[in-house]
Image (spheres, helix red, strand yellow):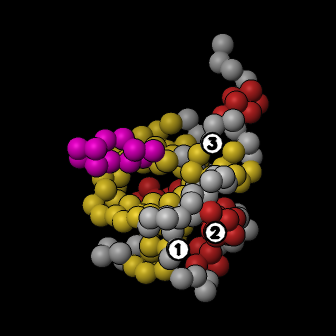
Amino acid sequence: MPVSPKLFRNTLAKFCTGVTIVTTKSQDGLHGLTVNSFTSVSLDPPMILICIQKNGLSHSTLYECEDFVVNVLSEEQKELSDRFANPALDSEERFLDLNFRLSENSVPILAGNLGHLECRLVDRFEGGDHTIFIGQVENGDFCAGKQPLLFYDGGYAYLVS
């Protein structure tokens, strides 16, 4: 018999993760959402995965996209994480007055991030109430000297130096 959803969720909350905002584009415009279900898959070729809830605001856009960017958030970007996690805000409101530049494929790269990975969507798999998206990393960059924004036990956490 599987573990109860409550026990599963509470146990996973004890696993500290980084926080990202995944951005993409569609014919309707720019899209983005806060994601902490992100990990590397392969070094050769360089591949990552993200898991997105099927009933989420940006799921259908990601499902149909060709390219996306994983923006790894720095500890100064908590408000940005909250903005892109807010289901009451549509895509246009999430990008309103936001500082970003566009990748070669016209996907937003957020200013002030800890790093970013520009990905081409290569596969997707069903995973219960989520879809697992596999991206091949085509380009990226990072900023040395910044600290990450972390998520732990239902809230934000910070590294102590």
Question: Which secondary structure lies at badge 1?
Answer: loop
Are the residues tagged 1 and 3 within 8 Å (C-beta)?
A: no
**Who's the residue at 38% across and 61% down the image?**
117
143 left or right, relative to 54: left
What amino acid type should be assigned to the residue bearing mark 3? Cys
SS majority, magenta = strand
For label 3, the residue is 16
> In the rendered view, would you say 137 is above or below 24?
above
- 3 with respect to 99 (left or right): right
Tag on residue 112? 1
Whether residue 57 is visible to the viewer of this picture, yes or no, is no
- Percent x, y of residue 109: 44, 73
Q: Quadrant for the N terminus, please.
A: top right
**Most foreground residue, 123 or 143:** 143
Distance from the alpha carbon under mark 1 to that under mark 2: 8 Å
Magenta-span inclusion, residue 60: no
**Disc 2 marks which residue?**
76
Secondary structure, mark 3, is loop
Distance between the alpha carbons at the discs numbered 1 and 3 = 22 Å
* Frontmost residue, 65 versus 119: 119
Q: Bounds of the magenta span? A: 39-49
Residue lying at 32% horizontally and 73% vertically, measured from the top left:
105
- Look at the picture and state if 25 lies above or below 14: below
